[in-house]
Amino acid sequence: MSQTQIAYYICSILCFIPAIICHEVMHGYAAYRLGDPTAKNAGRLSLNPIKHIDPFGTIILPLILMVMNGPIFGYAKPVPYNPSYFKNKRRGDLIVGLAGPLANLLLAFLGAIVAWILYPAAQSGLLANTFFNYFYLLFLPYFTLINLYLMFFNLLPVPPLDGSSIFAFILPERFLPKYYQIEHYAMPVLLIILFVLPYICNVDIIGVYLNFAAGGFANLIFPFTVVGS
């Protein structure tokens, strides 16, 4: 394994762990601010990674992707919340649902801001330093990208993703009972969209959407091109 590959894997792990943890913590914090103590009582408002580990999503899946030379990606254990604590359940669900993607958006902006602050140093020749080179050209872009990928992916209006809270919010109330029934069977639908649909259509629609949305947004806020066209 080359030095560049080792640096890539280290940067990937250091990027995706805070991205998924902050995403879940913000769900719990939003619920807590709305009067729901469920996440707090479960110890899930902590930034300690151990509190949020999902055996498959946080450990096994990233390792599989690493062995397959794919991008390191995963997810944390979903934070529990109880909408019965909310004064307005539909609005509370929406706020909690959007809190996670918002956390990723803020982290993406943080990565871009640091890149802009260090841009004069990079232009002055500091990129010749190996550590700075990896940090500036590898870590910061990937940190921003992985947060944007998480944000745009979770905003898809497909249960159990966060975007489904938007769909539930605008849906007429008479349709909600049926919608919540369908939501129980949403995971197989999501898996079909992610893994079966690309083979049927011969186009990875989700991948195209994510590359366009996350890559385009990253290029917009960064001082240099992050994703080529």
Image (cartoon, rainbow, N blue to C red):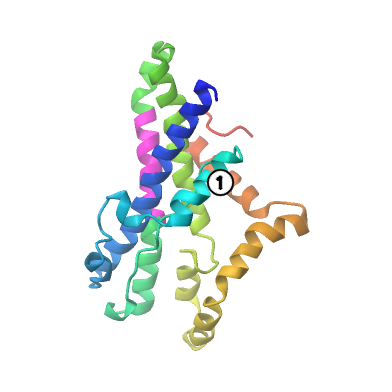
* Image quarter (top left, top right, bottom left or bottom right) of the N terminus: top right
Q: Is residue 206 left or right of residue 121?
A: right
Residue 41 placement: quadrant:
bottom left
Question: Of 57 and 220, which appears nearest the observer?
Answer: 57
Q: Is residue 92 magenta?
A: no
Q: Position of residue 43 (x, y in %)?
A: 24, 62
- Amino acid residing under circle 1: Ile
| Figure quadrant of the C terminus | top right
Overall secondary structure of the magenta section: helix
* First to last magenta residue range: 101-115
- Across and down, in percent, residue 222 comes to 45, 32
Q: Is residue 80 above or below residue 152?
A: below
Look at the image and tell me whether residue 224 can be seen: no
Dot 1: within a 10 Å radius of its alpha carbon, few (fewer than 14), some, or many (20 or more) residues?
some
Q: Is residue 148 left or right of residue 216?
A: left
Q: Residue at x 48, y 27 (%)?
A: 6
Disc 1 marks which residue?
64
Q: Quadrant of residue 144?
A: top left
Residue 31 in sight in this render: yes
**103 left or right, relative to 158:** left
Judge by depth and name the residue closer to the eye, 61 or 160: 61
Residue at left offset 35%, top offset 64%: 79
Q: Looking at the picture, does residue 206 appear above or below residue 116?
A: below
Q: Residue at x 52, y 32 (%)?
A: 226
Q: Residue at x 54, y 61 (%)?
A: 156
- In percent of width and height, residue 85 lies at 27, 78
Number of marks in the image? 1
Q: Secondary structure at mark 1?
A: helix
Q: Residue furthest bottom?
A: 174
How far from the left and from the top, in percent, is residue 109? Answer: 38, 41
Determine the image quadrant of residue 30: bottom left
